[in-house]
Image (cartoon, coloured by chain):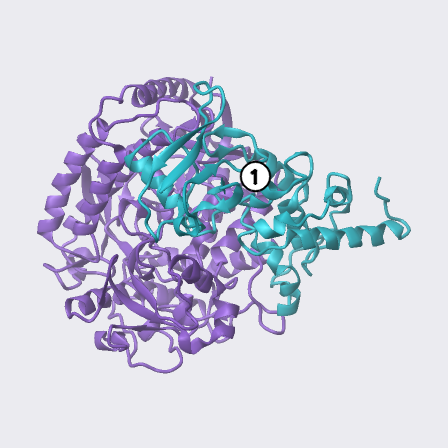
Amino acid sequence: MILRVNRYRPGVDDAPVFQDYEVPDREDWAILDALTHIKDTVDGTLSFRWSCRMGICGSCGMNVNGEPKLTCGTFLTDYSGPVTVEPLRGFPVIRDLVVDIDPFLANLSKVSPWLVREGEEPETEFAQTPEQLEAYKQYSMCINCMLCYSACPVYVLDPDFLGPAAIALAQRYNLDSRDMGDRFDVLSTEEGVWGCTFVGECTSACPKHVDPAEAIQRYKLTAAMRSVLPFTRRRP
Amino acid sequence: MAAEEVDVLIVGGGGAGLRAAIAVAEAEPDATVAILSKVYPMRSHTVSAEGGAAAVIGLADSLDEHAYDTISGGDWLCDQDAVEAFVREAPRELIRLEHWGCPWSREPDGRVAVRPFGGMKQLRTWYAADKTGFHLLHTLFQTTLKHTEIKRFDEWYATRLVTDGERVHGVTAIDIRTGRIDTIAARAVILATGGCGQVFPFTTNAAIKTGDGMALAYRAGAPLKDMEFIQYHPTGLPFTGILITEAARAEGGWLINKDGYRYLQDYDLGVPTDTPKLRSMELGPRDRLSQAFVHEMQRGRTVETPYGQVTYLDLRHLGEAKINARIPFVRELCLSYEKLDPVTDLIPVRPVVHYMMGGVHTGVDGETPLQGLYAAGETACVSINGANRLGSNSLPECLVFGARAGAAAARYAVQAAKPDQQAVRTQGADERRRLEQERDGRDGGRERISEVRALMRRTLEESAGIYRDRDSLEKAAGTLADLRERAAVARLEDRSAAFNTELLAGLELGSMLDVAETIVASALNREESRGAHQRTDFPARDDAAFLAHTLAHRGPDGTPRLSLLPVTITRWPPGERVYGR
């Protein structure tokens, strides 16, 4: 099996180039296993991020044959012929398959992704029924792998767009019965939910079955309702 | 002048490190605090913890029972003052996590739900389905975003502690993105880099778990404690080593051999019952279950696979609804990595290196013998885990002792003298020369770093596995000395500055070799069997000689110097470990 890997070393390569590596066509190998095989036995200069290799740390997202994938959960047997591995689209490339994730983290921080409460902390837990937990649970499953950003046609053209994961995370807290915030000022903007053209690629790309597209559509409704109520700010 | 100066620098951004950062911010709001980690915080290995976090909550439970389970589970090597502090503060820590938004699983009336866990006599394990560590880590990380005063150095790799022999003054580190080698001066440093499972070939531990914090402390003169105690988790998936959580057994799963027989009944762990019984059979402690597997293998009752001998975890009788509700990640992992469905199929499992009971020697506030240096979480050895950790004690350990270390380091930092800039400058320049030489002068080496690493891993598995003996440990000590020389001249093909992961792999191998040497030397020195340390040549526990911690100091020639430190006993004198009867 041929792995066609996108290489870029700042200061060495003028532009990204493809390099082919022959890897054993092992039926139990993920794309990530093939990459570590290359790193350990063929070419020590290939750089990529990985860690847990069980689909939970979110480190190893790359574009595989043009689609954003977690390489630890995407297997060689899913492909025939050469497999192209490129860095995630939509982010500046630092080197080889490593992209700059600071813009993503900056967007996450913008939505106040923490429990907004006022008053003293009680001695015991806040009560929350299983149904109340269910109301936001799927949005809490995001592993920050950024595949949805890479799949999003809006984000790849406009890095100011908050993007699917950040909006889903905002909704994770908005829909939490313990949370008192609504994150209206940051969500109900052109860079927020109103920037989304509802293509739904984010939801298809998510390896954890989060539904950011639904989060965005639901908040559009919330924001529209709120903007017609008195004593609230209208969206610009 | 150092590029940066902070009051408290935390190395590591997982559960313990993030909790420590919040503790610093709360204890001393005027103190400056930063987290430096080789990965972004949400990539930290805490993310992989599955089953839960133990803390007394039910009316039927008591702090003393949690303490007794922990101490007997640890085969009486735990420091009981530390355990008492731990069980007392764990409930408050888990409630704080709840207040910060952690999506704990719930009872129908809205209270936090608890589940049984191995070696625990009461239901006290809080859980967020079977992604507890993931939710705990993301909750902590997102909460730190609220504290804008917490500065971060994401993807920086600490290479050395700056010290004057008595006190720490900061670290030298590589900014991985640019390759720049820099210094960060600090009045106090907290090590929270997690464990070192990558020293072994077959482990649940993520690729980043290379013992860096342990090696930093060790090289700076702080001792490592109880490094011979390595936890094998009984249920890892073959080939990948991916963990199948103990929660699968807590929810009613069975371990069976090739004949479909629940073999744990042959190993003094109780009699099989249809529903789980606490401290019995599949809910016995991890060390005893992993040892039972080895005996089954020796009796020819395991199953041969391309990736070694296995037994089976049987969840089929739980039914699809319960599996989806309580352990959905187990199903997801089996479908993805084994192409099988636990609703209808048996899961092949084998013991896998999971956790280090040992680590940097600390007191109950995370303090080390080196002034200004603290450690918490798996990097540290307080010790609450003794010779064998109970499942679901490690997440609350990260929180309780992360918080304690953070508060103690903050209090220390506000009254400590400023870091010695001269020392930081000089040692920073030394380190810059060393690392540039490392990066640029090693293209002629014969062996790859990965080859030396593979040999180290095999050496550890063959000598310091579930059962050990003098001959294999002595041989391993010799092999490791040889590998250290070979690692120093191993080939480095990548000389670029930006994101040079081959250089990092070389530095990580150096950390792992230090840690590996202390594991082998400590295991050789302990001529008894206790908890996870089983010597076939000394099969009995020997309280007269070894009711004591092993301390490993780095000697002048770079090899470990060992000594013993008595265990702190408060209220639970050493006794027999009894499970299932």
Question: Which chain is displayed in purple in the rendered image?
Answer: B
Q: At which x and y percent is residue B554?
A: 23, 36
- The colour of chain A is cyan
Q: Is residue B370 visible?
A: no
Residue closer to the observer: A11 or B477: A11
Query: Above or below — where is B27 with respect to B300?
Result: above
Query: Above or below — where is B42 with respect to B67?
Result: above
Chain to which the residue tagged by mark 1 belongs: B
B256 relative position to A179: left or right: left
Q: Which residue is located at x 47 percent, y 63 percent?
A: B55
Q: At which x and y percent is residue A25?
A: 33, 47
Q: At which x and y percent is residue A94?
A: 50, 28
Residue that mark 1 sits on: B28
Quarter location, residue B297: bottom left
Q: Which residue type carries mark 1?
A: Glu
Label 1, residues with CA under 10 Å away: few <14, some 14-19, many ≥20: some
